[in-house]
Image (spheres, helix red, strand yellow):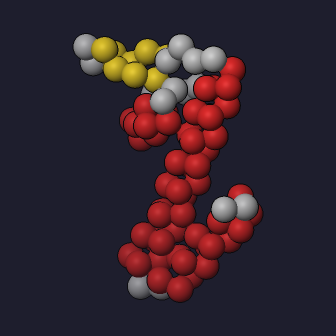
Amino acid sequence: MNMTKPRIKELAEQAGLYFYVNGKLFPQALSAEESIVAYEKFAELIVKECQEACIRTGILEQDEATGEMYANAIRERIGE
């Protein structure tokens, strides 16, 4: 996983895939079942981030309806 992007690092940590020790990022030791849960959570966080970006973009462009439409399309596509 490319861990050079700060936001990706944050989302991976939030999902439980990685943790910090003395400012360094380390992979979390997970069982197979824990890995499935953590990666599902990571995917959910990325989708949520995309939805929020659509809404923010719509608001910035003063077209909230379009931003919300794209966010809803992402929700429907993922099956949320």
Residue at 41% of width from left, 78% of height from top? 59
Q: Quadrant of residue 1?
A: top right
Residue at 58% of width from left, 18% of height from top? 30
| As drawn, 64 above or below 76 | below
Whole-percent x, y for residue 17 in the image: 51, 26
In front here: 1 or 22? 22
| As drawn, 26 above or below 73 | above
In front here: 65 or 19? 19
Whole-percent x, y for residue 20 in the image: 34, 20
* Left or right: 69 as drawn, with respect to 79: left
* Left or right: 34 as drawn, with respect to 25: right
Residue 5 visible from this viewpoint: no
Whole-percent x, y for residue 24 in the image: 33, 15
Residue 30 visible from this viewpoint: yes
| As drawn, 62 above or below 74 | below
Whole-percent x, y for residue 49 in the image: 49, 55
Residue at 48% of width from left, 72% of height from top? 55
In front here: 28 or 61? 28
Looking at the rendered structure, the number of numbered marks drawn on it comes to 0
Residue at 58% of width from left, 70% of height from top? 71
| As drawn, 34 above or below 62 | above
Most extreme residue toward the left is 22
Quadrant placement of the C terminus: bottom right
